Image: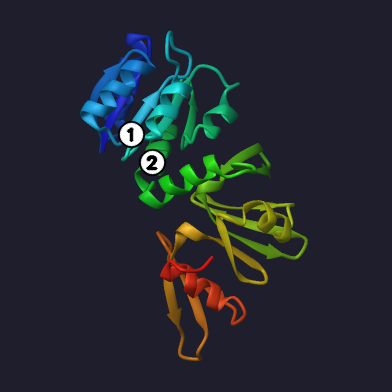
Amino acid sequence: MKILIVDDEAPARGRLANLVRAVGGHEVVGEAANGAQAVSCCSSWQPEIVLMDIRMPGMDGLEAAARLSHFDQPPAVIFVTAYGDHALAAFESAAIDYLVKPVRRERLATALSKARRLNRAQFEALQLSAEAPGRRHILCRRRRGVELVPIANVQYFKADQKYVIVRHADGEDLIEDSLRQLEEEFGRRFVRIHRKMLVARLRLAGLEKSSDGRCYAVLLDSDERLEVSRRHLPQVRGLLRGVGG
């Protein structure tokens, strides 16, 4: 994939370019020293991934990312910064990852892999998230600390006793929100397919019927098949036909 590196310090750009080459499978097509140059370069070279610093003179990385999000084919933005206090703002700008300098090769490889999986449906979900009210991230508490999972990366929510399982691009977590609360907040982006499950609308790819007559939802980029109840089947069918939901 084609990568643009954006940083106001030339040595930092060089180090990052070397890391990209060490990871392999990608091509650095150019460099930029600030946000304005980044926007111009993206317009000319159309990179698929932008590795961008946040604090830069003139147009900073956050403003540049906001402008890039309006491109017809926006690149996947990964922020690379020496400061850890911009994480929330970075994710709110629809960046797909956030790396803190000094960047390790293994961590960069993970971020690039995530960017490679980003498809058009996720870009549309990111745009919808920006327009819709409510949170843009789900707060998940893990042993190593707090993790912010972008709503655009969520495939489905599933009720599980006292908790709700959130299945997303990088695995799954337990959260304390109730399914009803999630439906009220994110109803524009998710559809109920079962009394215990909400699925991202843009993740729905089709329906399959089993030999016993049950229907299952097919998701984009997933081998899972999720049962659709008879009660919610008409809404799911209508949504897939583009006339319901």
Q: Position of residue 216 (x, y in %)?
A: 50, 76
Residue found farthest to the front: 243
Q: Which residue is mark 2?
A: 115
Q: Earlier in the sequence, mark 2 or mark 1?
A: 1
Q: Closer to the camera, 186 or 23?
A: 186
Figure quadrant of the C terminus = bottom right
Q: Closer to the camera, 105 or 206?
A: 206
Q: Eyeballing the image, is 102 above or below 196?
A: above
Of helix, strand and loop, which one carries label 1?
A: strand
Q: Eyeballing the image, is 155 above or below 106?
A: below
Q: Position of residue 66 (x, y in %)?
A: 45, 29
On the question of residue 224 being in view, the answer is no
Q: Closer to the camera, 128 or 196?
A: 128
Query: Residue drawn at (24%, 22%), measured in percent from left and top?
Result: 30
On the question of residue 63 being in view, the answer is yes
Q: Position of residue 101 (x, y in %)?
A: 47, 20
Q: Closer to the camera, 97 or 126?
A: 126
The amino acid beneath tag 1 is Ile
The amino acid beneath tag 2 is Ala
Q: Eyeballing the image, is 89 above or below 213?
A: above
Query: Residue drawn at (66%, 58%), measured in percent from left and top?
Result: 183
Query: Residue drawn at (33%, 23%), measured in percent from left and top?
Result: 39
Q: Which residue is mark 1?
A: 49
Q: Eyeballing the image, is 214 above or below 124?
A: below
Q: Are marks 2 and 1 in contact (CB under 8 Å)?
A: yes
Left or right side of 38 for 211: right
Q: Position of residue 132 (x, y in %)?
A: 57, 45
